Image: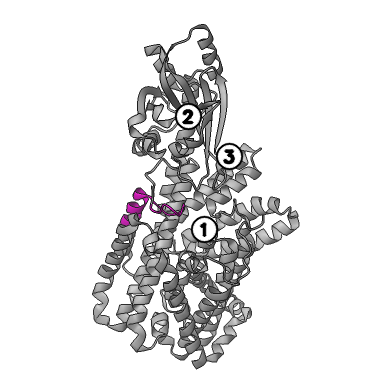
Amino acid sequence: MNDPSPQPRDWLPRGAIASIGVVFGDIGTSPLYSVQESLGGHGAAAPTPENVLGVISLIIWSLVIVLTLKYQFFIMRADSQGEGGTLALVTLAMKRVADSPRLRKMVLGIGMFGVALFFGDGVITPAISVLSAVEGLEVATPALKPYVIPITLTVLFVLFFYQHKGTSKVGALFGPVMVVWFAVLLLLGVVNILKQPSILQALNPWMGLHFLFNQGGQALAVMGMVFLAVTGAEALYADMGHFGRVTINRVWAFLVFPALVFNYLGQGALILGDPEAAKQSFYLSAPSWGLYPLVALATAATVIASQAVISGAFSAAQQAIQLGLLPRLTIVHTSDQEKGQIYVPAINWALLIAVIGVVIGFGSSSSLASAYGIAVTGNMLSVTLLAFGIVLRHMFAWSWVRTLLLFGLFLAIDLAFFSANAIKFFQGGWFPLAMGGIIYFLMSTWNQGRSITEQAVRQESIPLAPFLRGFEKEAPVWVPGIAIFMTSNPDLTPMPLVQIISKFGSLRETVIILVVRNAPTPYVPAAERLAVTPLADRFYRVVIRFGFMEQPDIPLAMRSLKLGDMPFALEDATFFLGKATFIPGPKPAMAPWRLRLFLSLINAAESPALFFKLPPQQVMDIGTRMTL
């Protein structure tokens, strides 16, 4: 599929500066801790010249293979109307296996697994990024060590507290600050390389391979630390819809990649000259007079990186809700100009509580490094399985030989990184897996519960066609106005409609059976938003479609509605919503404790009236009880 964004004439496309903060914030702050943990952390390789060259070579070539080859050359071509991310990939894969229920279930399971681990990663990233930046104060003055945790918690609390104001308030600063950050990374690298030019040998991939072949079991542990350099790769794919593949690729090639490579080489050069510097190689690579400004800049960069992860969590939650994987949550749009700028209060405060617990529980970036990585590698595995196993092969009509060669190469790399991080399970790696497992369980419970409730509704409902034929024999008393009945199944009679007829014998003179559909695309064109079908005299079926990146707004969508020759006036309409109370039956379709969890999720979900932005004074809830 071709990139939908226009091909710009300038080498630096529009939006490039903004993308530097949003897309590359996470991976751009990896130099704060990746070399330090690989050569100076717990279980790290001894900082001998041979090991330094090998580790730096592994870091650089991981950037080349994972970031450049895998994601930019291949994964980012699997887009859904220009949008990327795990759930966009799921929708593409679901189309390819539409005729196989078993494969559809497998694809959905892999997608939920990847998204759950993304949320787990969303807890670790802000904690380790900000903590590693503030720890630079220890290097400047050891007496400030007791204040590192309080300062980190304060920065994180302020960051999460102001999420409701939206990223547009500070978004203009993101790009310029990160441009300065990458320029400083580049400058620090060049200065230190000039002092130890022998570090340039690390550009030879054989140095990394030699390290792996000669370190035995320790090589696997070090690979888990090397992987810290490529965390944030998923942001390139997830944010593709905001900036376009061309913009992201060019910013990576012309700024981010050179800055990272030179900085990693510079840190390696510093350690070649002073092996003791491995314990804080990033901050020690700067002159003493520039340490405090560097800590301030690093803190700003990590806040930006954390902001990008938090915004990504909001977007992932919105997509999951639209795809029916999470219950309805309150979603606030923080910008009237940018669709993607949203705030999800429940996700925000849950992340804050988890992040605070992580900072206090782990206490240092070195301890957090053991927990970091396993969730990211799991997410990368899910992307590889879906992209190469299903989407790209069909999209580009690849042969099985080419598919297996590429799939095998990147799967082997993902599995190597996953294995390297898995050995850190008991050192903290269990935490993001536990977080992801909880989220996966909630999504699977919600998904299964929705299927059960839909089946129960079908069993209790009356087919719509014969119900409408009954009006030909006995018409109700027609009263002025428009009655809108929302339903998820257009072939069944909404229960509120049956109850109103049976109890009152009267009905509004215009009746709309309203169906909201979640399209398997990010956005739905305005021309395809509404579909109107006359059902009988006075009865219409209206289908409204929303993409998985859109926030449903029914009143806005219905502004252009026309019912034959009759104009539609929203102020004359009343929305009748079914408010079902589900109770466990003698033989529930789910385990009783899990069913109770599902029912609690239903109760916690935002009401349809608020979620679909219905005018509250024009909504009437009609209750009913159903047994599951």
Amino acid type for the residue under numbered disc 1: His
Give the magenta-colored segment's residue range. 334-353
Compared to residue 380, the image places residue 16 above or below, namely below
Identify the residue under disc 2.
568
Tag 1's secondary structure? helix
Question: Relative to residue 11, is residue 573 depicted above or below?
Answer: above
Residue 587 x %, y %: 43, 25
Location of the N terminus by quadrant is: bottom right
Disc 1 crowd, CA 10 A, few/some/many (<14, 14-19, 20+): many
Residues at marks 3 and 1, CA–CA distance in whole angstroms: 22 Å
> Split into 4 quadrants, where in the image is the C terminus?
top left
Helix, strand or loop status at disc 3:
helix
According to the image, label 3 marks what residue? 528
Residue at the far bottom in the pictured view: 195
Mark 2, mark 3: which one is toward the viewer? 2
Residue at image x 34%, y 52%? 350
Which kind of residue does numbered mark 2 sit on?
Phe
Where residue 73 appears, x then y in whole percent? 64, 64
Q: Based on the displayed image, in which of its 4 quarters is residue 103 positioned?
A: top right
Which residue: 43% across, 24% down? 482
In the rendered image, which residue does mark 1 sit on? 242
Q: Residue at x 57, y 71 (%)?
A: 12
Q: CA distance from mark 2 to mark 3?
A: 18 Å
Spatial CA span between label 2 and label 1: 35 Å
Foreground disc of the pair 3, 1? 3
Helix, strand or loop at mark 2: loop
